Amino acid sequence: MNLILFDHPTIRQNLLPFTFTRPVATIRCGILTIAEKWEKHLNLKASFSTEEYLSKKYPLLHSADNLWVNGALCPDAELVKAIADLKMGEAISKDNIILAVRTPDDEVPEVITGKVKEFEQPITLIDQMWKIFQHNGAQLRADFELITAVRKSERINDPHTRTYNEKNIFIEPGVKIWSAILNAENGPIYLGKDSQVQEGAMIRGPFALGEGSVVNMGGKMRGDVSIGPGCKVGGEVSASVFFAHSNKAHDGFLGCSVIGEWCNFGADSNTSNLKNNYENVKLWSYAKNGFVDTGLMFCGLMMADHSKCGINTMFNTGTVTGVSANIFGDGFPRNIIPSFAWGGAAGFTTYQFEKAMHTAMKAMERRNMPLTAVDKEIYRNIFEMTAGERVWEKKSN
């Protein structure tokens, strides 16, 4: 059986700007990405059905027996069993959304000619960008059980580190901890291979720290936080997800937020996640081309890949930042910042493509990772696709 994770077109639009640079299933929620969850549950290697301009980096592989799974769907035991039991030509759905189908076809069939079963149990579908942090705590707990089952944690050898409910803390090989407080009474704490928790850091579960990532000295991780691999995080962080290779190394608050890959926060940057009037937060929707009500009182910053902000940047509640934006200056920038924007509250110009790619290359070189020709082609497509967002370009023409 061949596992294919497909982008549902509407969900993909709802998850922009994060899905400008990746298939839906490569979004991180919990310790793992959605794709990694399915690979572990089904013991199969996934390929992706996504936008054509992403297909060189995320290829689609098909066979005579394809299991197509909605890339926004998070697995659980009952769902995995229902999908694994599918026979050829069968599908399962929920509220008119196809969750999975088993077929020899080389694309998801528009009409399922076989038997379609309605899945009766609740599901976790990451079909809006705020659901990434909203479901992160529950997914972190589920991933913790999946990853650590029948395994033994490494020991904490530092005599000055204090733990609470240590049985709910799992430490991979190579982890270094100095004089930290790890409180797993409200949820598990997972420290990935070769990660570091530096002096004076305070961590409340649920919390995950990816491979090679660092919680800097005095960092305050307040729970429901997932830090992907290759990140450096400090200051105060609450109910937020970092995909990978992003830095918020200094003081400043970040809450109820989602941060893509290769982002960087200047010192003392802060994000509001609660409006002064306690009204629901509205977020910019690329699908609607307007703001939508999240139904949430708490919602912070959605920052896509390779975006960066200067020191003391202030983000309003419910700000969405596109791909490769560079934000700086005093005052609050607008709460929708286009891709390849350069500036802040005083106004924006265009972050010219080659300059943006040079910065991306330098950032990746610091982690010994290349900006490949395939990556650059993807970003070229995004630069052209998002030109209409940069309204100042129209005024200057």
Image (tube, rainbow, N blue to C red):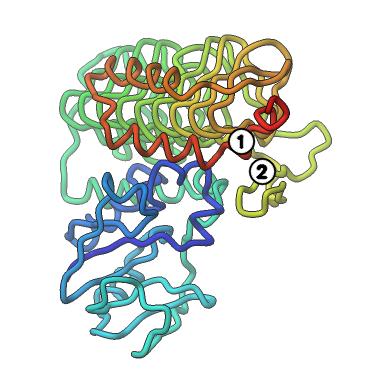
x%, y% of residue 272?
A: 67, 27
Mark 1 secondary-structure assignment: strand
Nearer-the-camera pick, 323 or 74: 323
From mark 1 to mark 2, how far is it between C-alphas? 6 Å
Which residue lies at the image location 55% right of the left edge and 32% below the top edge?
A: 339
In the rendered image, which residue does mark 1 sit on?
Answer: 320
In the rendered image, which residue does mark 2 sit on?
Answer: 284
Which quarter of the rendering shows the C terminus? top right
**Three-letter amino acid code at the position of disc 2:** Trp
Q: Is residue 292 left or right of residue 237?
A: right
Name of the residue lying farthest toward the front: 397
Which residue lies at the image location 26% right of the left edge and 79% below the top edge?
A: 103
Q: Is residue 144 left or right of residue 322?
A: left
Nearer-the-camera pick, 382 or 126: 382
Name of the residue lying farthest toward the bottom: 114
Kindly check if marks 1 and 2 are in contact, taking CB atoms under 8 A apart as contact: yes
Where 373 sits versus 269, above or below? below
Which residue lies at the image location 52% right of the left edge and 42% below the top edge?
A: 385
Mark 2 secondary-structure assignment: strand
x%, y% of residue 155?
A: 19, 27
